[in-house]
Image (cartoon, rainbow, N blue to C red):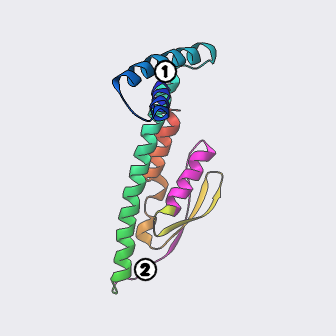
Amino acid sequence: MYFLFLLFWIVCNGKVTVEILLVGMILCLGLYIFVCKFMDYRPKTDWNILKKLFQGLQYIAVLVWEIVKANAMVLRYIFTLKEEVEPRLVSFDVDLKTENARVALANSITLTPGTITVDLQGKHYVVYCLDKELAVGLEDSHFVKRLQKMEEET
């Protein structure tokens, strides 16, 4: 929160000089102490927000990597005339506690080329896969592991 206050101070001033930075650091520290004392804010909250932000960035990195891999696989299916595509409708259950995590998993599966989440009822997923190779390991994918780890640390 302190750094957000300081960033807001710098943006409002429009330039960065030593004087502006020093005055901003002192004022933002005072504002931060005020917020902690009178608005029931705790420095531990900052730490939790940073952890969640870091985990979210890791999740996005894993998502981008999985999208790139799936794109390569789908391109291989398109440009290889010899290979037969065998579509599958896969049904599985995943033990995610929160609705947000379940929806994030469904959206991540849909964002990955070659797979579409057809149905989500509670913890039960139905996913259409372009090929049986894309259907392997959906219930214990990197997405599921990351989301479960994020839920544990909440």
Residue drawn at the location 44% of the way across and 73% of the way down = 131
Where residue 85 is drawn, which disc sits there? 2
Q: Is residue 85 magenta?
A: yes
Q: Is residue 98 magenta?
A: yes
Q: Earlier in the sequence, mark 2 or mark 1?
A: 1
Amino acid on which the number 2 mark rests in the picture: Val
**On screen, residue 24 above or below 154:** above
Occupied quadrant, residue 70: bottom left
**On screen, residue 58 above or below 108:** above
Residue drawn at the location 37% of the way across and 31% of the way down = 16
Where residue 28 is drawn, which disc sits there? 1
Number of numbered discs: 2
Where residue 86 is drawn, which disc sits there? none
Residue drawn at the location 55% of the way across and 51% of the way down = 104
Which residues lie in the magenta part?
Answer: 83-110
Residue furthest right in the image: 121
